[in-house]
Image (cartoon, rainbow, N blue to C red):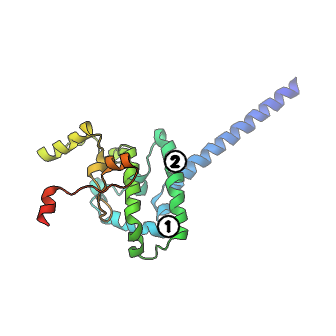
Amino acid sequence: MAEWGRVSIGALILGAAIGVGTIAVVFGGEAAISRTDFCVSCHSETYPYEELKKSSHYGALGADPGCKDCHVPQGFKNFHLALWTHVMDGVPFLIEEFTVDYSTIEKFNERRPEAAYRARMKLKGWDSMTCRECHKNTKPPGASAKAMHKKMETEGATCIDCHQNLVHKKVPETDLNASLKQGKNVPKEEPKEKKEEE
């Protein structure tokens, strides 16, 4: 009986050590691969990073956001989403890094629309939670902006529905609600007054 107790305690200690070690590796690994310098170690990601540094988001309010601040949900409650994002988005991007020629910005731009679409749909699915981490209690200026923000209550819109092309090079905007319904990239229609100007 005494020997059985020693085996159980030993097994319990070993199990606890393995559990703690596993948690440390998972959380530490997630933190490591969420760093901007890890993201830009892939050549293709250096292009959007340079665009970020020239955008109005960089340096705003004394903050220099990195890749994860927009593209990876943060915090313990969203840890499962961060892992999911790295597996479902990061792995395909990593494969593309080795199978697609991104040696020039022109070659990167050929695939940019698809990358922008995927990022926008991800933000839409998250209800733009990464935007809301910094932009809390927004107060839109003017009647037009207030009316547009009402869409969040009436049309199921979220930040990314209206705020596309803020950080990276301009890509034709996407109608995200229509894209969700149709399961493909549906370009946003230009306002009538803009079409008439052309």
Q: Residue at x 33, y 44 (%)?
A: 132
x and y, in percent, of residue 103 in the image: 46, 76
In-front residue for pair 157/165: 157
**96 sits left or right of 57 in the view:** right
**13 sits left or right of 198 in the view:** right
Task: Determine whether 167 is above or below 25 in the image.
Answer: below
x and y, in percent, of residue 185 in the image: 36, 55
Label 2 sits on a secondary structure element that is: helix
x and y, in percent, of residue 14 in the image: 74, 38
Q: Residue at x 52, y 52 (%)?
A: 88
Label 1 sits on a secondary structure element that is: loop
Q: Residue at x 55, y 64 (%)?
A: 95
Name the residue that disc number 2 marks. 84
Comes first in the chain, label 1 or label 2: 1
Question: What is the quadrant of the N terminus in the image?
Answer: top right
Name the residue that disc number 1 marks. 42
